[in-house]
Image (tube, rainbow, N blue to C red):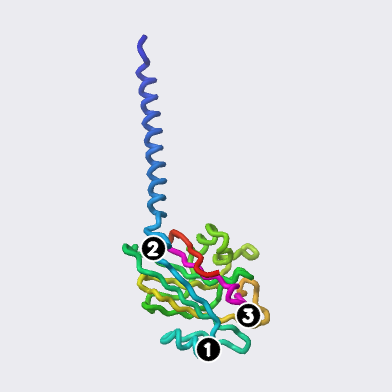
Amino acid sequence: MLCSTGRVKRWAGLILGVAILLCGTGGVVGWRWWHNRPPYGPDALSPQATLQFVDQATADAALEPVNAIVAGDGDQIVLGRVTWTRPPNPQEGGSFRIVLLDKRSHRMPGFIAVTSARPDRVNAGSDASLDIAEQRYPWLRGVGLREINGSFWSSANAVCVWSVDASPVTFQTVLLHAARPGTPSEQMVPMAPAAVEDLLIALISVGPDGQVYWAQRLLH
């Protein structure tokens, strides 16, 4: 008994279509794996952080030639420092985010002064990488956008580091002793008084396309 030629062609077409679909799916999965694969882990950097409360003169000296934020009566001045070792094969276009997070309120500072070994390669700011990191790491709750009454808000800043050669990075912020009257909830920031142990420092590794490779808790 002869097999139908049309049926054979239909089956051949179906098999070819499935094969192409599987190859396409496998290619997408493989690309995503490669795209999100860290070029190195935190161990390659051996990152460390310190944090202390200081007076205005100490903050001014530590931030030179950048202007430190001026504190008022009853405010607390926070001075932080993050260092790491240059990895053997740094990724071109990679960057870091340094996060200072108040674990009591899950809020970040609104203003940060920052300098480094490469002052032109650091700044205060925020981007979508913080939202990605928050979704992936529960202990980073509060670093991304906040949804309030159907809108998304962020009044917070992290330290953006655009060169692996920027270490050490020194940053400073001020915890206000009291919120300004009428400050809406979406603009609230960490408040004084705080203990050093209330504040968390994390280092986030970000790829050239904004992909988050990993986040490392450095302090508290």
Residue shown at the point (47%, 78%) measured from the top left = 171
Circle 3 is placed at which residue position?
Answer: 192
Q: Nearer the viewer, residue 152 or 25?
A: 25
Labelled disc at residue 77: none
Circle 1 is placed at which residue position?
Answer: 56
> Please, is residue 157 above or below residue 141 in the view?
below
Real-space CA distance between mark 3 and mark 1, rounded to the nearest whole angstrom? 16 Å
In the rendered image, the residue lying farthest to the top is 1
Q: Position of residue 49 (x, y in %)?
A: 48, 73
| N-term mark: 1 or 2 | 2
Q: Residues within 10 Å of mark 3 (few under 14, many from 20)?
A: some
Residue shown at the point (67%, 81%) measured from the top left = 181
Residue extent of the magenta highlight: 189-205
Real-space CA distance between mark 3 and mark 2, rounded to the nearest whole angstrom? 36 Å
Q: Residue 135 is drawn in which quadrant? A: bottom right
Camera-nearest label, 1 or 2:
2
Is residue 137 found left or right of 206 in the rendered image?
right
Camera-nearest label, 3 or 2:
2
> Please, is residue 162 above or below residue 193 in the view?
above
Circle 2 is placed at which residue position?
Answer: 44
| N-term mark: 3 or 1 | 1
Residue shown at the point (38%, 51%) measured from the top left = 34
Q: Which amino acid, mark 2?
A: Ala
Q: Position of residue 124 (x, y in %)?
A: 47, 75
Q: Residues within 10 Å of mark 2 (few under 14, many from 20)?
A: some
Q: Which amino acid, mark 3?
A: Ala
Q: Secondary structure at mark 2?
A: helix
Q: Nearer the viewer, residue 160 or 102?
A: 102
Q: Secondary structure at mark 1?
A: helix
Question: Magenta span has 194?
Answer: yes
Q: Residue 161 is drawn in which quadrant? A: bottom left
